Amino acid sequence: MTKPMRTAAPAWEHPSGYDLLRNPRLNKGTAFTEAERRAWGLEGLLPPAVTSMELQVARRHAEIANLDDDLQKYLVLSDMQARNETLYYAVLMSDPATYMPLVYTPTVGEACQKFAHIFRTARGMYLPISARGRVKELLANWPEQDVRFIVVTDGERILGLGDLGAGGMGIPLGKLSLYTACAGVPPRYCLPIVLDVGTNNQTLLDDPLYQGLRQQRVRGEEYLAFVDEFVAAVQQRYPKCCIQWEDFANLNAVPILARYRDKICTFNDDIQGTAGVALAGIVAALRLTGQKLADQRFLFLGAGSAATGIAELISLAMAREGADLATARQRNALFDINGLVVSSRTDLAAFQKPFAQDRAPVSTFVDAVEALRPTGIIGVSTVPKLFTHEVIQAMARINERPIIFPYSNPTSRSECTAEEAYRWSDGRAVFASGSPFPPIEIAGRRFVPGQGNNVYIFPAMGMAVFATEATRVTEEMFIVAAQAVAEQVTEEDLAMGLIYPPQSHILDASLHVAERIATCIFDQGLAQMPRPTDVGLLIRERVYRPLYPE
Ligand code: NAI
């Protein structure tokens, strides 16, 4: 038997030849210099011309811009990530406003729906409940020795699209890309995970290409025991790791967060990140209306994890302005599929009760608007078009500057469009949505709709936690983050109706927010390192830059 020409390189040895070209972290593609090509056995394996990274980025911009279909663009980007990670981040970071909607919402929604059909190569980790008792063993297969950030989903409530089972992997993948692209968390510390406990989506179960466990979702004690095992395994292998829960259904999201939030470094972005970004929008909106937070009244369409998370954070922020917390909660009313959340209802979950109003039931949203006279309405129902003409007209009658936030994702689930909100309020709405809407002109006036995208909060939270090695993620950190986002909105932004900083400068914005959060972490005594004299420098020193390794 002849000896194989090439044996797998030992872990400590720099890969060469094709192994190097196929190592996404080290690959530079056509940017390998002639000296590097000689040193690493690449001569003849690449076309002879050496391309600069700037040219490589320009090539990808042109390729992607020429495609008509966003899902195709998503695939080009994710192939690039699998091939050349540095170039992928260089492309994303060169124009985040263009690329964020492609690697995350709204495009990622379609990618998750079609995940098995567009699957190319395995990325991240799949932990199936069938491996119960062996999670630690599976986790040991991940090649990185130091992981600081895990985004994990069980795929049950992907954006507003429902149960997509193992296809939910698109969410941790996309989200972690944003941790890096928007706040500089180094990608090697990031790990995307799907906890596969089955799916109740019959279309997926009937699809021969479906890649997850072919069974109904496991619930109850067995489910929780599996989550416990996962958390313990992560703690053991990666003790400095923060776990971010993502797109779990309400029935699990709230209890999971409650179970771990005071024990480990963890947060739920749907609940706390959403709350942070909504609060940021409100704080900026109040700069427009000139009012105080404690004087606001909000009515939420939806009473799920996003709604109650936002309502609670707003209540805490109102309490910081001197309001009593119970009274503050009463200024945040919820309206769900069964009507206004009132205390006489018998179907309320514990996390909804603090917001229940002591009044007669109200069955339509517009009647609830008339009854409560809110200063703002926030849509987190997953149901499109529920902010009707009548609702927005009523808000515009009650308020000089009504706050209208249709936050349901993706765009197809938005409670109203930007145009509807501006048109039906005679241009007076202070508007922000979950998914982006393009700028519009109505009667010669230009409106730039803001996107209440969690991306203003979670990457910065990740960077601050990473840089300080924080032991917990607290509500105070989200309030500080919201204020840090809002203070970056300029007077010019506000004049156009824009209540979030432009996404084109997201890295700078996130680093500012991260510095403020990190300061709060040190103030709260939650950092696992001595306080530096310059917290901003601590953050900047740890930022990932998409530069090829020498
Ligand atoms: P959830 O499933 O926990 O809650 C949905 C709520 O809407 C439930 O209370 C339900 O009763 C209510 N609802 C459903 N149909 C209704 C109807 N016809 N009328 C009134 N209420 C109705 O979902 P979750 O996690 O709270 O998310 C909701 C939405 O918020 C999703 O579309 C999600 O994408 C979006 N979201 C947006 C974020 C952002 O833009 N920053 C961040 C997180 C979530």
Image (spheres, rainbow, N blue to C red):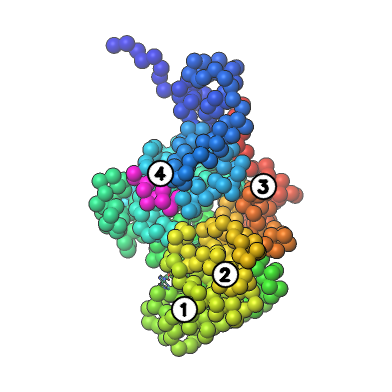
Real-space Cα distance between discs 4 and 2?
46 Å
User: On the image, numbered disc 3 is attached to which residue?
Assistant: 539
Residue 544 relative to residue 371: left or right: right
Can residue 255 be seen in this snapshot? no
Report which quarter residue 330 is drawn in: bottom right
Which residue corresponds to the image point at 60% horizontal and 30% vertical from the top-left? Answer: 55
- Amino acid type shown at disc 1: Phe
User: On the image, numbered disc 1 is attached to which residue?
Assistant: 365
User: On the image, numbered disc 2 is attached to which residue?
Assistant: 423
- Amino acid type shown at disc 4: Met
Report which quarter residue 548 is drawn in: top right
- Which region shows up in magenta? 108-117
User: On the image, numbered disc 4 is attached to which residue?
Assistant: 125
Q: Nearer the viewer, mark 4 or mark 2?
A: 2
Please, is residue 294 above or below residue 496 in the view? Answer: below
Tag 4 and tag 2, C-beta contact below 8 Å: no
Upstream in the sequence, badge 4 or badge 2?
A: 4
Magenta stretch: includes residue 21:
no
Residue 204 relative to residue 549: left or right: left
